[in-house]
Each structure stands twice: as C-alpha cells, then as structure tokens.
Image (cartoon, rainbow, N blue to C red):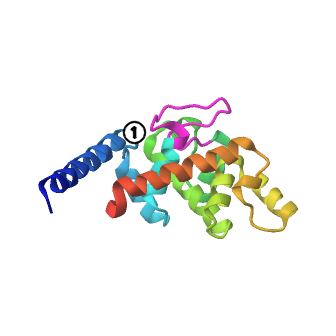
Amino acid sequence: MNKKTLLTFFISIIILVNIKTIFKFCYPIKYDVYVIKYASRYDMDPLLIFSIIKAESNFNPNAISSKGAMGLMQITPQTGEYISYLLKTSKFSNEELLNPETNIKFGIYYLSKLNKDFGGNLDTTLAAYNAGEGNVRKWLKEKQYILKSEELPFLETRIYIRKVKSYYTKYKWLYGQSY
C-alpha cells in the first residue's frame, strides 16, 4: 500500500468516526435506564423505542400535542387510562403521563400489545400506535389483508411510519448491538 492510499484510508476512518459522533448528537440515547428496563420486560427492541420517542417528542418529557397526547411517547389520556387498566395499576391521573418512567412503561407496554395483536408486523404496529388500533382494525377488515404503509388512508400515519423506520435504521447503524 502506498503512502497516498494509506493516508486516504486513515482519513476515511477518522471522518467515519466523527460522522457517527455528530449523528449521535442528532439521535441521542436518553432515559435509557427506563427504556432498557421496560423494553426487556415487554420484549421490544430498545432502539425502536428510542426511534419512537425521537419521532413523538424528540425526548421532551413535557411535550403535549395539539391532540392532547402527552410525554415522551405521546400517550393520550384516554389511552393512558386504558393502559393503566390493562396493567392493573391503582389510580391513574393524566399528569402521570408526564413522568418519564410511567410514560415509557405505558408506551412500551402498549407498543408490545399492538405488536402481538398485529402479528409482529412493524408497519401495522406503528400505524396502530399512531392512528389508533381501532382505525387499523377497521382498515384491515376493509382490506382483508395486512396493510402496507403506502396504502394507509391517513397521510400523517404514512409519514410517521417512514420517519420512525428511518430513525430506527439510523439508531441501529449508530448503536448496533449495544442495546
């Protein structure tokens, strides 16, 4: 290997390492203690959860959407109450959705439930998380087969699925098997 080739190789490695470092600022790992704890408990990939949190709230635990969804994983009070019932937790209040641990626990539990209900199909699971499982069940009944994200009637949900899957690809590239 000549000097020019060797120099090009080392410069390429340095650039690649620095690009990953820069990307990690854009695709952070936050609240990992809770994400790992509940992803393990409910058999979900932590990197998928980080991708959803980035898409939903960009890691802002106090985020509240125009539709009233709250916290890191953007859970509506109605869905929070439903999850609380499924988990058999005692008292539930909407403010609990702004607590990072509760929000992550509820979000991962619900995502796991949807994943099981929809046969592990990621697009359908994400569609149900975003648009509501009732809507997805209706769409599936109308179509009589598993939905493809490009066929969904809600543009917002089609965009959401693309965004989460794009983030998921980046998280896997950046963090690999570390999580």
Q: Nearer the viewer, residue 19 or 132?
A: 19
Could you tell me what secondary structure mostly forms the magenta stretch?
loop
**Place of residue 111 in the rendered image (x, y in percent of width and height, measured from the top left):** 58, 57
Residue with the most extreme right position = 142
Would you say residue 90 is visible in this rendering?
no
The magenta segment is 55-75
**Place of residue 18 in the rendered image (x, y in percent of width and height, measured from the top left):** 26, 44
Classify 10 Å Cα crowding around label 1: few (below 14), some (14-19), many (20 and above): few
Q: Residue at x 78, y 52 (%)?
A: 135
- What secondary structure is marked by label 1? helix
- Kindly identify the amino acid type of the residue bearing the numbered disc 1: Cys
Q: Residue at x 46, y 39 (%)?
A: 99
Look at the image and tell me in which quarter the C terminus lies. Answer: bottom left
Left or right placement of residue 72 versus residue 126 in this view: left
Residue 58 among those drawn in magenta: yes
Left or right placement of residue 80 versus residue 72 in this view: right
Q: Nearer the viewer, residue 114 or 155?
A: 155
With respect to residue 178, does 34 lie above or below? above
Would you say residue 131 is visible in this rendering?
yes
With respect to residue 22, does 125 lie above or below? below
**Place of residue 19 in the rendered image (x, y in percent of width and height, measured from the top left):** 31, 44
**Place of residue 171 in the rendered image (x, y in percent of width and height, measured from the top left):** 42, 52
Q: Quadrant of residue 173?
A: bottom left
Q: Which residue is mark 1?
A: 26
Left or right placement of residue 128 versus residue 75 in this view: right
Residue 26 among those drawn in magenta: no
Q: Residue at x 23, y 52 (%)?
A: 13
